[in-house]
Amino acid sequence: MPAIATKPQLICGVDEAGRGPLAGPVVAACVVLDRNHTIQGLADSKQLSEKKRNELTAAIKQFAKAWAIASASVNEIDQLNILQATLLAMKRAVNQLSLVPDIVMVDGMHSPKLEIPVQTVIKGDSLIAEISAASILAKTARDAEMVLLHERFPEYGFDQHKGYPTKKHINALQMYGITTAHRRSFAPVKTIAYINN
């Protein structure tokens, strides 16, 4: 008796960028890869150069079966906390997909509540191609957001440190104060807000 051909599972990889910074949104992306179009070089976005991330972003958007990017704002981060805001961004991204995957695989230990089966994968951005692709889309999208914020607040250097708590960023916060782009619930920002009040 011939074997029954089973349809390959549609795997949706999900990852985020921007949980640690003191400013800017948290961005999540999800990707369903097309098994007929292998994208070479997929890896954890943190292990790739900016040039390579940008090249892979173009390839993912061209060859993936489906992809989506969503975010949670600074206000949502401050109201919900960073974990819940991250899960909200992930849920928004999955809900924007043009198709319904069979399973959603999320990098890390926490996952959003979805109608679709979800699996968390520790270090998934290094192990699962779909999660690697999502990490790259999330990182490049968030970096682009921070460059736009730099145009509004050039003295903070958002185009360089992308909102992370570098020495230059902390010095700028102490010198110029807090902007609307800053997360007031994060300790260094909260401390400076308290001192300045």
Image: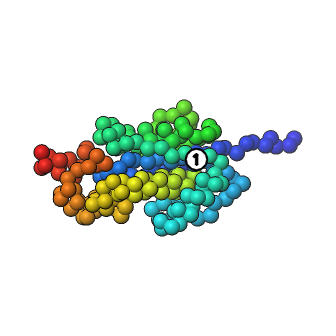
Residue 196 shows in the view: yes
Residue situated in front as seen by the camera: 191 or 151: 151
User: Residue 96: where, in percent of width, then height?
Assistant: 55, 39
Residue flagged by tag 1: what amino acid is it? Answer: Trp
Residue situated in front as seen by the camera: 156 or 4: 156
Quarter of the rendering occupied by the C terminus: top left
Residue 12 is drawn in which quadrant? top right
Q: Would you place residue 156 above or below residue 86 in this image?
A: below
Relative horizontal placement of residue 52, taking residue 83 as reference (left or right): right
From this viewpoint, which residue is outermost toward the front? 152
Quarter of the rendering occupied by the N terminus: top right
Relative horizontal placement of residue 48, taking residue 1 as reference (left or right): left
From this viewpoint, which residue is outermost toward the right? 1
Residue at 28 percent of width and 59 percent of height = 156
Residue situated in front as seen by the camera: 166 or 6: 166
Residue situated in front as seen by the camera: 192 or 85: 192
Residue at 48 percent of width and 38 percent of height = 91
Residue 144 is drawn in which quadrant? bottom left
Q: Which residue is mark 1?
A: 67
Relative horizontal placement of residue 90, taking residue 76 as reference (left or right): right
Residue at 63 percent of width and 39 percent of height = 99
Indicate the colouring scheme.
rainbow
Residue 20 shows in the view: no
Q: Would you place residue 142 above or below residue 98 in this image?
A: below
User: Residue 64: where, in percent of width, then height?
Assistant: 63, 51
Residue at 60 percent of width and 55 percent of height = 60
User: Callout 1: 10 Å neighbours few (<14), some, many (20+)?
Assistant: many
- SS for dot 1: strand
User: Residue 172: where, in percent of width, then height?
Assistant: 23, 60
User: Residue 195: where, in percent of width, then height?
Assistant: 12, 49
